[in-house]
Image (tube, helix red, strand yellow):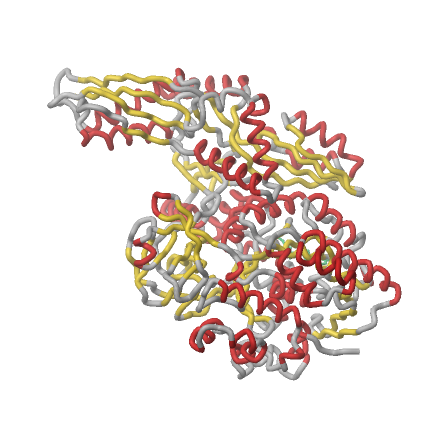
Amino acid sequence: MRTFRAFTLQSRLASAAHWPPRPVPAPADDLLRRCDASLMQRLPSAASTRHLLRFQHSEAVSPATDPEQNDRAVQVALEEAQIAARERGLTGAPVGRRNFGIAAHIDSGKTTLSERILFYSGRIRRIHEVRGKDGVGATMDSMELERERGITIASAATYLNWQRGFHLNLIDTPGHVDFTIEVERAMRVLDGAILVLCGVSGVQSQSLTVDRQMRRYRVPRLAFVNKLDRQGANPERVLEQIVNKLHQPAAFLTIPIGVERDLVGVVDVIRQQAVYFEGEYGEQLRIEDTIPSSLKSKADQARRHLIECLANVDERFGDLFLEHDYGVPEDAIHRAIRRATIARSFTPVYCGSALRNVGVQPLLDAVVNYLPSPVEVRSYAMQGDTEQRIQLEPDANASLVSLAFKLEDGRFGQLTYLRVYQGTLRRGDLIYNARTGKRLRVPRLVRLHADQMEDIQEATAGDICAMFGLDCASGDTFTDEAGLGRRLSLESIRVPEPVISLAITPQGKTDAQANFSKALARFTKEDPTFRTYLDPESKQTIICGMGELHLEIYIERMRREYGVECQVGQPKVNYRESVSRRAPFQYLHRKQSGGAGQYAGVQGYIEPTLEAGYWTARPEDSETAESDRQAMSAVNTTSEEGGQAVAAQREATKRAAENEFVNALVGNNIPPQFIPAIERGFQDAVQEGALSGHIVQGVRMVLQDGKSHPVDSNEIAFRTAALMAFRKAFPQAGGVILEPWMRVAVQVPQEYSGDILGSLTKRRGTVVNSQTDGEYALIEADVPLSQMFGYSTDLRSMTQGKGEFTMEYLRHEPCTREDQERLIADYAALRKTKAND
Ligand SMILES: Nc1nc2c(ncn2[C@@H]2O[C@H](COP(=O)(O)OP(=O)(O)OP(=O)(O)O)[C@@H](O)[C@H]2O)c(=O)[nH]1
């Protein structure tokens, strides 16, 4: 029996007299130097070696062990990151750092897993469960509402140390699709992720969404098959689903010893050793070279499968396999897993149960061993208007480029979460907001641990940190003067369109209105998928978001945090209006009888920002729709072509959502000082579409000519002329009303799949994918949101509560002629009533 290996380190320290582990005096860089002296000698200079080895946060768990005893995989991970840094000539590279997130379907156990990770790394002293009996709640669910409901609403960031001074930044994300922006933001700034899957339910509807998000931001991942203590758990089925449903080559790195109530440990597939998790919280690892005889052949098969899988996805390993057969050296296996994981052509799969404290430490080892250091990830910034992509270097000594990816309004003012991609951000430094060009001094810099924080003096390339007291928007890029000179900016986060809206009115106390406005201002700033506006007709405040739960949570937060009770209307679909062809406009606004006169003429045309005809037919019937569908399905490919198709799709979606004003004026018929007023008239017009009063999107207004009067022309006249010209031209330009369509994923026991298909088709859905897997069927369909109200109740009654579904915004599409006519008639009636009032 062996009692210690690298990943047992934390547990060994834990089981010793001191818990959490005491700071170890030996600096991590010293250990590293000893660990790989030969590689270090090849580095350019002693000074750069120090930079390379600089671990800011080595104070926690830095074991003073003999390098020989250390895990070979860790050495592989270090060496590879060091080689990558050396090849790129980086002298201040963050080699020993990992930025990773945890994402999954609702209730898969992400927060429970995070709690273990924090505990084993010595970050917290006690484990508190989600909805635990002690009523404390998990560390990462710090919001009162999260603890009460047992769901994660906002992602939380923390940091920890693991294995010889590796510094890990961790972001726990919410599972519910209504809070999808939190996952988007996290994926944008993370270098790797753990996809948690339930050992019983496997790949669920929201796992597919998370998988798409990981692909969108090219995030390498590990999979953790959790809840193997539950009745009906079947890890092999989950592995099959990863391969078949997520289309990812994958293999076990650990397999469970016993399942359901008998789960006691895992087998390390590479070394063929049994690992048991003992102590109150599984913090003491016992490793045995002999694995239970009943598992021998299974474990051997798993090892063979892993080697075959790697030989298939990694050419270099394939050659080694031809040479050594299944006897490939262990180092080579680690290297191949690392390469293939980082290349996103392979997913290592780990087994366990977070709640039962089984299998978490090997997973955390894998974060260090197989997920990339920031040095091994390519990040790019755009340069100025040229749209030229510049590769960023994760080097503390380079000029600063960092991204504000999340804002939070806290007790001390705005807290801005940042990822530093290049350079060093120091407290007191002058930095520049690349969007506004504004110069700012870095006020207070902190590292976050759920809702607590710790002041730091600097954050270097590859770090995630936060700043206080800085006014900026989510997605802003911060640079130093050199970066500003090159006008570098980072591609921002994809923000899905809000699909649902409802009217709210604050009730009661006199200060309710002020608090109500304060709350709305804060929520809209923090969450770009939460929007609000004043309905010009009803004068009510309308809030828009990603789903009923999303809005419900904000209404509840308004009550708790701001003491504002609201009267809430029925949820409504967010329709939009657009045009399908070009139409000319020519409008003269003239009032010259008595008093100050008004005189303004505008002439030009309006047209769709996408090609003509894009919106005329339902996309299913058109070629555009075909390319659209191909682009959507290309999200599941890793090919260059797939990437281009996705980029084209994103570009089309962006253009379809934006309006544009073009000044193509020739001659001097309109004095230049009136052009901004004409553009403002256009902006007024798109706020209220001419057909149904909904916001207009995807329309370009081109101004070509006009008329003015030396005395009677003024800004108000031109603003009105532009507004009226737009309204008049809108119907001639083939105005259409668009409605949001959702990608709906339903998971039900197989016997109900016929009923589900019927129910989706009845709701005008188009089934895009239907798979059966053992007892379960997973059906994906595109359905208009207007048809989805009340679906959860229907699904519950159709499946006796055994079905579940999630939906995600896909795009806006023209609604049916019938609906369009109804919406136009409703709007006309409303206007008539208003006119009569
Ligand atoms: N049996 C069993 N239950 C678990 C396990 N892990 C988590 N749970 C339970 O599953 C429920 C959900 O766990 P969470 O950790 O909140 O899941 P989550 O994925 O963070 O949830 P959201 O963020 O709200 O989507 C809780 O009641 C946990 O106690 C496990 O390994 N086995």
Which residue appears at 51% of the width and 77% of the height? 41
Q: Seen in the image, is 293 located left or right of residue 745?
A: right
Taking depth in this image into account, of 11 and 337 the one nearest to the observer is: 337
| Nearer-the-camera pick, 128 or 82 | 82
Q: Is residue 169 above or below residue 758?
A: below
* Picture coordinates of residue 451, whole percent (x, y): 49, 63
Q: Considering the image in quadrants, where does the C terminus appear?
A: top left
Residue 115 lies in quadrant: bottom right
Q: Residue at x 39, y 23 (%)?
A: 607
- In this orientation, which residue lies closer to the viewer: 443 or 604? 604
Q: Which quadrant does the N terminus fall into?
A: bottom right
Any part of residue 266 in sight: no
Residue 131 in picture, x, y percent from top left: 64, 58
x then y, percent, for residue 686: 37, 28
In depth, the one of 320 and 622 nearer the eye is 320
Residue 665 position (above or below residue 294): above
Q: Quadrant of residue 4?
A: bottom right
Dividing the image into four equal quarters, which quarter contains ligand 1? bottom right
What is the count of numbered marks? 0
Residue 553 drawn at (x, y percent): 53, 47
Above or below, 119 relative to 565? below
Q: State whether residue 225 appears in this view.
A: yes
**Which residue reaches farthest front?**
323
